[in-house]
Image (tube, rainbow, N blue to C red):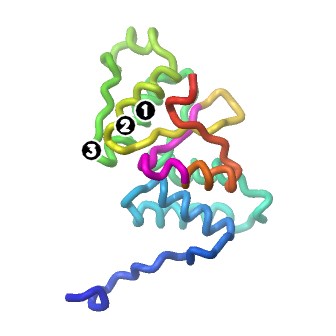
Amino acid sequence: MNSSDDDFDTTQPFDDDDDSLDAKVWQFLLLINPGDDDAAFQQFSGYREAVAELSEDEIDVAQVIGQVADWRATFHVDADDTRALVQAIDELAARWNLTIDWDGDTDEDEFHADIDAADLIGTAYDNLAPHGYTLWVRDTDDDSLAGWMSLSRDIEPMRELAPELGIHLHRGNEIG
């Protein structure tokens, strides 16, 4: 069987020269769903549906992507809710069969009383890095934390693409 014999459409929805907002969102979704084009496509479809009635200058890309990919490829939690933060990051890491060593029992109230979100983000970043993943945190306009994971080899593409989408971000080891 050669590649022309299969029934799957392996073409990307955009060519490499497409500089449209949709093409940039597609590339971003591929970065936060490494190796999972199906999930990226589902999230892209949700994004397109969510912005169908909006003009480009009305779209808050980070907010819409956060809605369509939350707890699947992104997280958005209250900054004081360390339990939700641990659960969200654990869920993202589990996509690639990774676990985070939180340096304590996250089921215990005492653990959460003695730690803040920045420490948790740093711990997760340090646990993911040896496996080739980077934890990102984006700026929010409120007292919340939002972010995603990508392959560490994609740091530069992420740093280039995010600002083009109006997303201000930091690696997990850069907050605190």
Task: Give above or below for 1 relative to 59.
Answer: below
Q: Earlier in the sequence, mark 2 or mark 3?
A: 3
Which quarter of the figure has residue 130? Answer: top left
Percent coordinates x, y for residue 89 in the rendering: 42, 36
> Which portion, as a residue range, is magenta?
145-156
Q: Which amino acid lies under the numbered mark 2 shown in the image of this protein?
A: Leu
Residue on which disc 2 sits? 128
Residue on which disc 1 sits? 125
Q: Is residue 122 magenta?
A: no
Secondary structure, mark 1, is helix
Q: Is residue 148 magenta?
A: yes
Q: Quadrant of the N terminus?
A: bottom left
Residue on which disc 3 sits? 97
Label 1, residues with CA under 10 Å away: few <14, some 14-19, many ≥20: many
Task: Give above or below for 41 relative to 15.
Answer: above
Percent coordinates x, y for residue 95 in the rendering: 33, 48
